[in-house]
Amino acid sequence: MYKKRTSIKPLLEASQIFKVILVTGMRQVGKTTFLRETASTEDGASTEDGASTEDSASKEDGIKSGAGAPKTTRKYVTLDNPKDEQMAKEEPEFFLETYAPPVLIDEIQYAPELFRYIKMLVDMDDRQGLIWMTGSQQYNLMAGVTESLAGRVAILDMLGFSLYERDDKAAAQRPFLPTKTPPALLEKRNLADTYRIIWQGSFPEVIGKNPNARELFYSSYVRSYIERDVRQLLHVEDESAFMKFISCAAARTGQELNLTDLARDADIAPSTAKNWLSILETSGIIYLLKPYYRNVTKRLTKRPKLYFMDTGLCAYLSAWHTPETLESGAMGSAFFETFVITEIIKSWYHNGRRPHFYYYRDSNQTEIDLLIEQDGLFYPIEIKKTANPHKSDIKAFDSFAKLEKTGYGSLICLTDQARPLTAGANAVSVWDM
């Protein structure tokens, strides 16, 4: 059963404004399914009960075009197909004649040679939404897009399913900001079910599946995608060294990044660790949360906090074999924080927004887990694995308010319902974000 994605609204809006749309993100988060399902409807609108999958339409039949494109079938081609990849690389003009717009080009990163010809093609056509593309290897992909398609392409980031998408409430999801009255639209889960979802992860292929299917998926994912794509970019010859590195990184989710310690534990040079982390970040596997400093240069040079963008993948790599051991183990709080951070990121990305996120820590070790900068205000967010929140948990909010103008704040935790902690902050359930 196809699950609707929050990203449909920014996709259709962008297709009215831009000639080229690129949906990018990790492999297997549902980019292709999302675009094919959206394009399969006559007017580009989302269907309530659509059940198509990546295999639901053939390349030959095409798929109906989305908003902003003419009312004809949108062709589909994937560059995972070696013959089409070869044609795109060696005969780009013939490729774009064969798959003339409107078209969906899947895995565009395999033929960056196309970008120059796409630019020439769309510059001669006044229609919007001509070319939809997906791409997974952001490191090389974005360089080609920036160089060739600047001003012509809208870039949308997609992650795994958000809680709203999981609960079939995708249309209701908005970029998260703390408010006095949270939306309270999601089904509440208890502690055990919450950690089962954290341990399971957010890839479409694991949601609703049994633990054996999850194990098989992540094992295959690591070998088929991380090793193939990321190692190809890095030219890594020692496979075991890279796997040890990424496992060491997974064990540090939710923590301030100490590059020297990570390199030492992975038995690699700090320069190698820095390079490999950069690839993981640009591939969408990790997120580095920058620290807040009034001095912008310090924000770029001081240590970030590391978060894996999928908690299921992170749990697999760090060898947590059950949700119960994860919840009660030494990393239970770090995974809960990672889960909340990534859900907040999804709420922004899937609405087509790029947020300004930071964490705060001063010389007295006063810390705020997340600051969201919006319209001249900083919204403070604390994250704690507790069902009994107290105002002492957010005492750092007052310290930070002496530095910047702050908006309403929240403590996101396991409380059963939202409750005020101070005049300017409340405690909110993770299920009420």
Image (cartoon, helix red, strand yellow):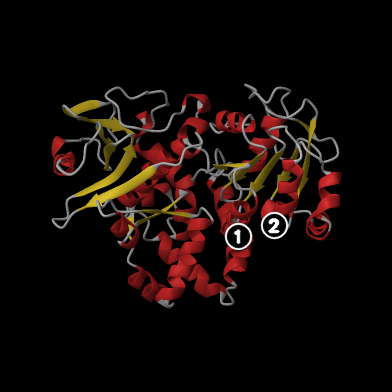
In the foreground, 246 or 375: 375
Instruction: Report the Cα–Cα distance between label 2 and label 1.
Output: 8 Å
Residue 69 at x, y = what percent? 72, 30
> On the image, numbered disc 2 is attached to which residue?
112
Q: Compared with residue 107, is residue 160 higher up or lower down, i.e. above or below?
A: above
Amino acid identity at mark 1: Asn
Q: Give the side of residue 179 with respect to residue 36, left or right.
A: left
Rendered residue at 57%/43% (across/down):
155
* The quarter of the displayed image where residue 12 is located: top right
Quadrant housing the N terminus: top right
Secondary-structure class at tag 2: loop
> On the image, numbered disc 1 is attached to which residue?
140
Q: Are marks 2 and 1 in contact (CB under 8 Å)?
A: yes
Quadrant housing the C terminus: top left
* Mark positioned earlier in the residue sequence (2 or 1): 2
Residue 305 at x, y = what percent? 34, 56
- Residue 196 appears in the picture as rendered: no
* The quarter of the displayed image where residue 301 is located: bottom left
Neighbours of disc 1 within 10 Å: few (<14), some (14-19), many (20+)? some
Amino acid identity at mark 2: Pro
Residue 342 at x, y = what percent? 42, 44
Q: Compared with residue 63, is residue 147 higher up or lower down, i.e. above or below?
A: below
